[in-house]
Image (spheres, grey):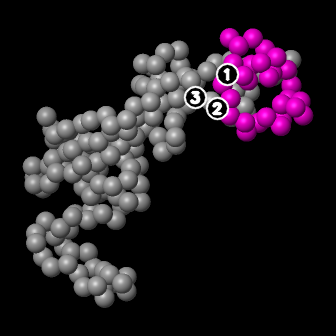
Amino acid sequence: MFMDLPTLPTQPDMDNTAVTLDNQEEHSDIERESGTQTIDPNAIILAEALTDKAISWQIHNCKIIKKTVTQDLPLPFLYHYDSLDDAIKQTHPLTPELLLQFNKPMSAHQAAKLIGIDEEVLTSPWHVKIIGSLVVFSEALQLAVRLHWTNTGKETQQVYTKDAADAIIAAFKDWQFFLVV
């Protein structure tokens, strides 16, 4: 199956990555140290090739390496308080005692108890982090590339949905490549 990869934000690691299509000698150490490297005319800038609509890529392999989807991770108190409806915030305003807890990680149950509200009033977000690898092949370039991707660069992405399946779908709207190509 051939496909065009979507235009995605790239990390700095990918922007300057070039692949040489033949076995020419490496540039001298002096060129590398002086910063006067010239780009080999047979080199491909991977970030450009991967997003070029004219180049077809075939997916060879796609794996999920790590998957976290849970509602059990603590969040700083301010995230819990911020998720409350404005009417509840007016009836339970921030006090000096609550302000002292702003950055303290806690569960929704602990935050509700601290505020003095029913636990069901607080929505506990899904924490989603999915990391995977993808191998794509371009027949025209005779090039295979292994890419690593994730839904977030943070420890997890907090998604406010009713169930885990919807949280995963929402988290994948903003996936990105990262680290080593």
> Residue 152, how many percent across, how many down?
47, 40
Three-letter residue code for mark 2: Leu
Residue 22, by quadrant, is: bottom left
The C terminus sits in image quarter: bottom left
> Residue 30, how many percent across, how many down?
31, 88
Q: Which residue is mark 1?
A: 108
How far is mark 2 from mark 1, CA to CA?
Answer: 8 Å
Q: Residue at x 16, y 51 (%)?
A: 144
Mark 3, Cα crowd under 10 Å, few <14 / some 14-19 / many 20+, is some
Q: Which residue is mark 3?
A: 73
Asked if the residues shown at circle 3 and circle 2 are in contact, with their CB atoms under 8 angstroms apart, the answer is: yes
Marked residue nearer the N-terminal end (2 or 1): 2
The reply, left or right, for residue 23 in relation to residue 92 is left
What secondary structure is found at the residue carrying circle 2? strand
From the viewer's side, name the closer residue of 11 and 109: 109
Residue 98 part of the magenta-drawn span: yes
Seen in the picture, residue 59 relative to 125 is either above or below; the reply is: below
Q: Which portion, as a residue range, is magenta?
A: 92-121
Seen in the picture, residue 152 relative to 34 is either above or below; the reply is: above
Residue 58, by quadrant, is: top left
Mark sitting on residue 75:
2
The reply, left or right, for residue 105 in relation to residue 12 is right
Asked if the residues shown at circle 2 and circle 1 are in contact, with their CB atoms under 8 angstroms apart, the answer is: yes
Three-letter residue code for mark 3: Leu
The reply, left or right, for residue 176 in relation to residue 110 is left
Three-letter residue code for mark 1: Ala
